[in-house]
Image: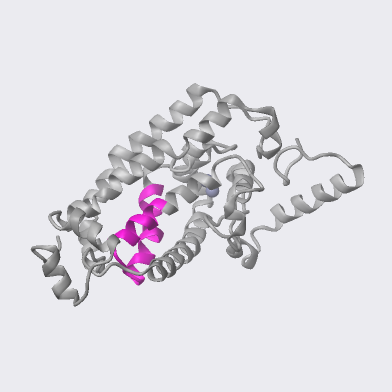
Amino acid sequence: MLPYHSLSDAQAALGRNLTLPETLWFNYSAQKSDYFLYCHNILFLFLIFSLVPLPLVFLELKRFSFLDSYKIQPKVRLSSDDIFRCYKDVMHTFFFIVGPLQLVSYPSVKMIGIRTGLPLPSGWEILSQLLVYFLVEDYLNYWIHRFLHNKWGYDKIHRVHHEYAAPIGFAAPYAHWAEILILGIPSFLGPAMVPGHMITFWLWIALRQIEAIDTHSGYDFPWSLTKYIPFYGGAEHHDYHHYVGGQSQSNFASVFTYCDYIYGTDKGYRYQKKILSKLKETNGVEQIGGSYKQD
Ligand SMILES: [Zn+2]
Ligand SMILES: [Zn+2]
């Protein structure tokens, strides 16, 4: 809740006129509690989990032949029942774990100092904080994910996320409830280290989930704008991790490729890619699907 009674109060406190985004924010948030604003994440996550994968579901069910060369594992086909079961399970975890976790985690958000007031952060502040959040999450997630591939972690927890050897968008948040809780830590650590505005926090939660859906999309489109993000892993990088499955000791990182490179856990993946591109060169065979496997 903003500590001003009116727009003119806010302008007097800031010593200047409000910008248009600040006026919109004032009108929207002035009478709402910080807790209620924080809980918007529940709605955002519900909409992202439900709507963002839909174009991918359409592609999966239609399977247009001209897009098959971009499908990473083109031989795997999921039915509408398979896809709906995945969504149903994700919603089950959403209503029993993700939503309640948001409801009870507010004190920690308050404690680290996520603010809701004015002035709003600049575009550069938002971008630089998001970059820190992505880097911190990627690094910690790498090690937790790698740890979850030990026998106990895999059998008891991480096996669930690997049920989809050829991932689809809906399978991004498909995981054991304990994994969802554990992986909440890397997501929260960045904002705890560099606390920002609630809008930045919303953006962070939303972008991280959209990125996860992208890396589980099952498609590697050469025109994707994410190709311009340095060291971005993308769908093919993570798809290989799912393709190899429980035995996988490769491609643990959630967002970028540099951790796997530095710690040598992308050797198998890079070797496969190299061999197949050589094969393609010498045989003149057109590679269908992902460049790490031959279909
Ligand atoms: Zn894994
Ligand atoms: Zn995955």
Q: Residue at x 67, y 48 (%)?
A: 222
Q: Nearer the viewer, residue 228 or 81?
A: 228
The image quadrant where one finds the N terminus is bottom left
Q: Position of residue 126 (x, y in %)?
A: 38, 66
Q: Position of residue 256 (x, y in %)?
A: 56, 60
Q: Position of residue 260 (x, y in %)?
A: 61, 61
Q: Residue at x 69, y 28 (%)?
A: 65
Q: Main secondary structure of the magenta part?
A: helix
**Quadrant of the rendered structure where residue 176 is?**
top left
Residue 130 painted magenta: no
Asked if residue 170 lies left or right of residue 106, the reply is right
In the rendered image, the residue lying farthest to the left is 5
In the rendered image, the residue lying farthest to the right is 282
Residue 181 painted magenta: yes
**Quadrant of the rendered structure where residue 118 is?**
bottom left
- Residue 152, can we see it? no
In the rendered image, the residue lying farthest to the bottom is 15
How does the figure colour the protein chain or chains? one colour
Residue 219's place in the image compared with 4, above or below, is above
The image quadrant where one finds the C terminus is top right
Q: Position of residue 153 (x, y in %)?
A: 47, 49
Looking at the rendering, the stretch of residues picked out in magenta corresponds to: 179-206
Q: Residue at x 56, y 25 (%)?
A: 61
